[in-house]
Structure formats: structure tokens, C-alpha cells
Image (spheres, helix red, strand yellow):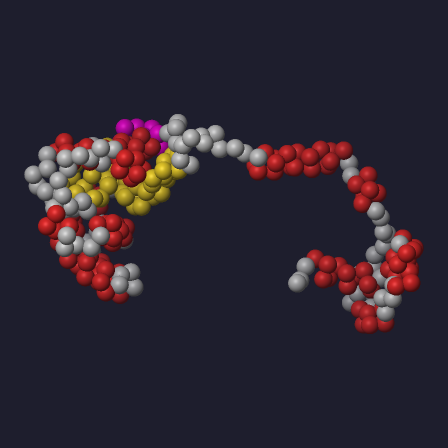
Amino acid sequence: MNCFFDWIMMALMRHPDIENDLKSYIPAITPNLDLRRTGFKKLNNEETALARFHLEIKSLTEITSTISQKQTLDAIDQYHQVQDYYNYVYPYQDKERSIAVTKLQALADEAGFEHLESQSSRREDALSLGTLVHNVLYYCPFDETDFTTLIARLKDEGMFTDDEYQLIHQYQHHLDDFRESDVYKIIAKSTFYKEKPFRYFNGEQVINGIFDIVFIHGDDVYVLDYKTDHITSSNSYKTLQDKHRIQLETYKEILTKQFHKPVKGYVYYLETNQMIEV
């Protein structure tokens, strides 16, 4: 194994006094010490002639006695800093170390929310679909590029398996509707930030998550969260607001502290092409 001693020991072995110094400092090893320095003669050449040094063997006690008081105190300070790090005790033992903002919402009561059972039974897992849709929207440039072109390019670049491509292709008409929406056109004219992760301590626990898209239009700041929930057009506006209220309220709280101004939060339900302010 290569290490510091691989080259420093070569220098020590080249020194003509090394064997005598070792025998003088540790007399007990004299009978067994035979360094056979003849093999190191080639180390003494024109290139190493000036690389001579004074050799002196000292005990650890002698070495530490030469260290200044300030250096000793610095070393002690560094030791305590390291100890403080490893001795740290998490002050909120009765709470989860970190919780996803979506889990906060999932813990809320969503009783009474209607699902499209007929479609959900024919579709793959909603989480898988949601991930695919979010991946496409992450790469959406919000320019003249249409989703047919974008999805085909992502497929060519290996973003999707054949099955995933079929799934996102079947869902594309919802993305096309989104592209024709007013909010899409506003985002295209705004400064926007996509898929930005965050960690936030709300005074009780650490919350982590990812903003789907934050955009600044004029003097206003907006956060928009895409949802692929299978909802019906009969769901009331308030029902749609309440479904993700905790999540969006958390987003607004975090961004308000970041931008020092009120932030408007929206959920965009791709299934029904609806944007709901929360």
C-alpha cells in the first residue's frame, strides 16, 4: 500500500548515519539490525547530492515539549470541536428527523375526495405516472417546443423505456392542454426555477421537498405544483383546494421568507386542465 513512508523511508535509508543512530538510540536492536545499505548506493548521485539533511531521533515526549503553548491550545480547541460534533444529540427525539412535505399532506384527512375508479383500474400505478409526467415537465423549456417533439427527444436520449414511453404518450393530450393554458404562457414570459429541492425547519420538525416550479412575473412570486390526480369535473373548487392545502401553504411559507413578500400558490390538475389557487 502506497503511503507517506514509501518515500520518506527511502530518504532515511540513504542517510549515512541512519544505522548508527538507530543502534545508539535503541541499543537493544543492535544484534538484529542489518540494513544492508549497499543496495541504496544508487540513491547517492548528482541529483540527490544536495538533498542532504540532518538526522536526529527524538522521543514523542521530547517532540511534544517543543510545541508552543498556543499550538497546544489550538490542538485542544480542535479536539473539542470534533468532540462536540460527535457528541451532538438531536434535540427533537420525539419527532421524525425529516418528513416530506407530501407526507404532511397525506396525514391530513382527505375523506370524501372522489377518484376515477374506472380509469385508475386501467392505468399503471399513479406514482409511476406522476414521476414520468414530472420528468417531462422538468425538461419543458416553456418555449415554442411542443410536447410531441420533447417526448420524442427524451425517448431518443434513453429517458423512457418502451412501456414508459407508451404511458406518457397516452397521457400527452393532458400536457398539450397545459401548453395551451394561460399559466403556461405566463411562465414562458417569466423568470422560472424548476424542480428546486429544499429543507426547512418550521420550529417543530425538518421538512423536505421539491418545488415543481417557482416563477417570478413582474413583481409577483408564484409557486405551481403539478398534479396527475385522477379527479372528476364534479369535484368542487374547495375540495380541490383542500386536497393539497397543507403542501401549498408550506411552500408559500418557505418562499415568503426567501423572497420577503407574499407568494401565491397554485395547484394545476393536469387531468382536468384546472388551476386552483390555494
Give the residues in magenta: 256-263
In the figure, residue 214 lies in which quadrant? top left
Give how far across and how far down residue 72 sits, in percent: 73, 36
Q: Is residue 124 magenta?
A: no
Identify the residue at horizontal 20%, vertical 35% (top origin): 110
Residue lying furthest left: 234
Task: Locate the C terminus and report the quarter of the image it occupies.
Answer: top left
Give how far across and how far down residue 62 sits, in percent: 84, 43
Residue 23 placement, left or right of 228: right
Identify the residue at horizontal 30%, vertical 28% (top origin): 261
Residue 49 in the image: above or below residue 250: below
Q: Is residue 182 visible?
A: no
Identify the residue at horizontal 82%, vertical 64% (top origin): 14
Q: As rendered, which of 269 and 68 lies closer to the eye? A: 269
Residue 258 in the image: above or below residue 151: above
Give how far across and how far down residue 130 sits, in percent: 23, 50
In the figure, residue 245 lies in which quadrant? top left
Q: As rendered, which of 238 and 96 lies closer to the eye? A: 96
Task: Locate the N terminus and report the quarter of the image it occupies.
Answer: bottom right
In the figure, residue 201 lies in which quadrant? top left
Residue 190 placement, left or right of 22: left
